[in-house]
Image (spheres, helix red, strand yellow):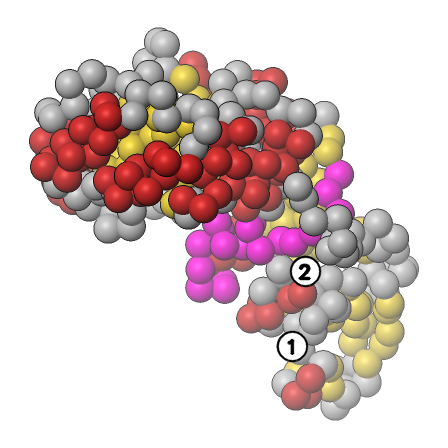
Amino acid sequence: MTDTTTSQIIGRHRPTIAHINLAAIRHNIQAELQRAKPGTEMFAVIKANGYGHGLVEMARATLAAGATGLCVAILDEALVLREAGITAPILVLGVTPVTWAQIACEHNIALTVGDQQWLTDAAPMLTGQLRIHLALDTGMGRIGFQKPTELADGLTVLAQYPNKFNFEGIFTHFATADEADHRYFDHQVQRWQAMMAVVPRRPRYVHVSNTATSLWHEACNGNMIRFGVGIYGLNPSGGSLTSPYPLEPALRLTTRLAFVKRLAAGDSVSYGATYTARHDEWIGTLPIGYADGYPRRMQGFYVLVDGQRCEIVGRVCMDQLMVRLPREYPVDALVTLIGEDGAETITMQDIATYAGTIHYEIATNLNMRIQRVYEN
Ligand SMILES: *Cc1c(COP(=O)(O)O)cnc(C)c1O
């Protein structure tokens, strides 16, 4: 089922580590479940390697903390979870080509369906009953039924094949739930209600909330939330809106000085020689680079050594980067790229802001070459 011929290198003999605090994961999930309407279920969104935190590990941690199901983006992620022995409900959020619908069926994996044609095409190929969730496009403009009439046609096909489809869920996705201005959100709610009016029987799962919707909007009659980035303690708005409870970031990224040297004034560092020492100074080399997912454009940002900010000097290389140290430090001294050291903290958001992106991208880019260590 999974391809064992692909070499997936994990840096086990390199001191660059993503520490995942499982206590933070539990805290974030439980805080969210406590403020949700009674009876609301949580499906933990663990696509993209659990937002960089580890797919199977995040499945186990979130289910143990109270999630009752899991969401992934693609069928292969769901298959890896089943192979790992996870029996909880799993929903694939993206569109799966009809060709592979039978595989989902065999592994009891629910698929997202966004048009009538998919149902018509899949029905003859299925030997059993496939769990499906209908996606309604209320303004995200990505996937899903757009009009009540289209949805009604889809429901007709479902009714024609009661032995092929288990109509288990219906959902939508909001485009602006992380913004203070509610107008577009309210517009989507109206479209949601207009479409739900043609659904004669509500399926088991009705779900409209990603993390931002759950944190900042009254749910529109949903009974399940798709909680994603909040699991990992990251604020979906990037900080422009305040979370109703403190989210605890779960990931710390550390490494150790691999090489330390003294530069003379006038000496340069890294490709392009874009940094030249103005004084004699101490330079440390870190065993992490853009091939690990630490963005190349972080030149000029900083890391923490001994509780002090140390500037990243010269271009970030593929596997290494250099920092200016305030004094000589020994090889192996601890370096924090994300997390706390003394009075200083670097957040995933700080990196995202500097890199001109969102923390989702920073988290999901931290790849498997960085070993994960699970704590607490
Ligand atoms: C990724 C995704 C989520 C989770 O979003 P967060 O912002 O991480 O909470 C929820 N629903 C859908 C459809 C998604 O694609």
Number of other residues with Cα within 10 Å of mark 1, as a class: few under 14, some 14 to 19, many 20 or more: many
Residue 242: mark in rendering:
none
User: Residue lying furthest bottom in this view?
Assistant: 266
- Ranked by sequence position, the earlier of labels 2 and 1 is 2
Can you tell which quarter of the image residue 232 is in?
top right
Q: Which residues are magenta?
A: 354-373
| Residue 223 image point, x, y percent | 32, 18
Label 1 CB sits under 8 Å from any ligand 1 atom: no
Task: Determine whether 164 is above or below 309 in the image.
Answer: above
Left or right: where does residue 261 sit relative to residue 242?
right
Q: Is residue 358 magenta?
A: yes
Q: Is residue 210 visible?
A: no
Decide which of 293, 313 is in the foreground and name it. 293
Label 2 CB sits under 8 Å from any ligand 1 atom: no
Q: Amino acid at mark 1?
A: Arg
| Residue 29 image point, x, y percent | 50, 23
Left or right: where does residue 74 sit relative to residue 313?
left
Q: Residue at x 49, y 63 (%)?
A: 354
Task: Determine whether 223 is above or below 264 in the image.
Answer: above
Task: Determine whether 259 is above or below 187 in the image.
Answer: below
Instruction: Determine the secondary structure under disc 1.
Output: loop
- State the count of labels: 2
Circle 2 or circle 1, nearest the eye = 2
Which residue is denoted by mark 1 in the rendering? 315
Whole-Å distance between the Cαs marked 2 and 1? 15 Å
Instruction: Determine the secondary structure under disc 2.
Output: helix
| Residue 271 image point, x, y percent | 69, 84
Q: Amino acid at mark 2?
A: Asp
Give the quarter of the figure containing the N terminus: top right
Q: Residue at x 77, y 88 (%)?
A: 267
Q: Is residue 99 visible?
A: yes
Which residue is denoted by mark 2 in the rendering? 292
